[in-house]
Image: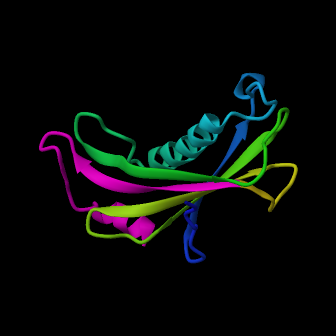
Amino acid sequence: MRYTVPATKKLTFELRIQMRWGDMDAMGHVNNTLYFRYLEMARVDWLTSIGAPPNPGGQGPVIVNAFCNFYRQLKCPGEVLAKHYVSDPGRTSFETWITLERVDEPGVIYAEGGATTLWFDAQTDKAIALPDRVRGLVS
């Protein structure tokens, strides 16, 4: 099943990620699990940049699903540009979307993925309303 990144989304963050030799697998390309790590790095760095990092003991973002569509093989050496987007704010959640391209090949998408981000209270173990400041950033 392929999920589609929507055309209507808001660019919120960009992150450059250096591919490491150890990111490659026996097939000679970046292992598929690392694509998810790159997506996570972009999402968490964006959340941290807006003052809303994951908070295991309090209130903050948690991921309730994630996906990645693989289009091309990333191979070392090189640098990945992760572009982070948001859309579809709801009462307790919003969507995040990330595209991965090589810095030396601007606009060529190697992979794209996303996740539903839920605002969560760890003390009550329940979803809560998005804080107004976060809602303003994802709207």
Kindly identify the residue that appears in the image at 73 percent across and 35 percent down.
Answer: 30
Which residue occupies the foreground of this view, 97 or 68? Answer: 68
Taking the image as shown, residue 137 lies to the left or right of residue 101, namely left
Question: Where is 47 relative to 91, above or below?
Answer: above
Q: Is residue 109 left or right of residue 15?
A: right
Magenta segment includes 7: no
Q: Position of residue 28 (x, y in %)?
A: 82, 30
Q: Coloured how?
A: rainbow
Name the foreground residue: 43 vs 48.
43
- Estimate the x, y position of residue 107 in percent, counting from the top left: 80, 62
Q: Quadrant of residue 123?
A: top left
Q: Nearer the viewer, residue 7 or 17?
A: 7
Q: Residue furthest front?
A: 1
Q: In which quadrant of the rendered image does the N terminus lie?
A: bottom right
Q: Quadrant of residue 2?
A: bottom right
55 lies above or below 138: above
- The answer to whether 26 is drawn above or below residue 18 in the figure is above
Q: Horizontal placement of 78 versus 2: left or right?
A: right
Q: Residue at x 52, y 56 (%)?
A: 114
Camera sees residue 138: yes
* Magenta stretch: includes residue 133: yes
Residue pictured at 81% horizontal, 49% vertical: 103
Q: Is residue 125 above or below residue 85?
A: above
The C terminus - image quarter: bottom left
Residue 78 spot, x, y in % from top left: 83, 37
Span of residues in magenta: 111-139
- Tell me which residue sits at (72%, 22%) in the image: 22
